[in-house]
């Protein structure tokens, strides 16, 4: 049998773990959105066009 304090400790650790996983997922989503915004920006389009001409 798990004591109440150990159970509470486990619950807190589990919730912290879940929160960290959620934060990591949100960071990756934000990174992808930022990447998409940069890919579609006029400045990046101009840079890519110049790079293609050089190659």
Image (cartoon, rainbow, N blue to C red):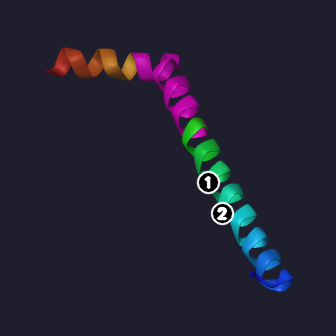
Task: Say if the magenta span includes residue 40.
Answer: yes
Instruction: Give the crowd class for mark 2: few <14, some 14-19, many >=20 residues within 10 Å.
Output: few
Res. 53 image quadrant: top left
Instruction: Decide whether the magenta segment is chiefly helix, strand or loop.
Output: helix
Say which residue appears at 75% left-offset and 81% top-offset.
2
Res. 52 image quadrant: top left
Find the residue positioned furthest to the right.
Answer: 4
User: Which image quadrant: the N terminus?
Assistant: bottom right
Say which residue appears at 58% left-offset and 36% top-offset.
29
User: Which image quadrant: the C terminus?
Assistant: top left
Find the residue positioned furthest to the front.
Answer: 1
Residue situated in front as seen by the camera: 38 or 50? 38
Which residue in the protein does label 2 denote?
17
Residue 44 higher or lower than 22, as above or below: above
| Highlighted magenta segment, given as a residue range | 30-45
Say which residue appears at 75% left-offset and 62% top-offset.
15
Say which residue appears at 59% left-offset and 45% top-offset.
25
Q: Is residue 10 left or right of residue 30?
A: right
Q: Is residue 26 left or right of residue 12?
A: left
Label 1: state its secondary structure.
helix
In percent of width and height, residue 5 lies at 84, 84
Task: Say if the magenta span includes residue 11.
Answer: no
Which residue in the protein does label 1 denote?
21
Circles 1 and 2, Cβ within 8 Å, touching? The answer is yes
Residue situated in front as seen by the camera: 52 or 18? 18
Label 2: state its secondary structure.
helix
Find the residue positioned furthest to the left.
Answer: 55
Q: In this view, does 1 lie to the left or right of 33?
A: right
């Amino acid at each position: 049998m798990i004591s109440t304090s150990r159970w509470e400790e486990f619950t807190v650790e589990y919730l912290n773990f879940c929160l960290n996983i959620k934060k990591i997922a949100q960071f990756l989503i934000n990174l992808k959105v930022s990447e998409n915004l940069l890919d579609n920006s006029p400045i990046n389009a101009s840079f890519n066009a110049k790079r293609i001409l050089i190659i």
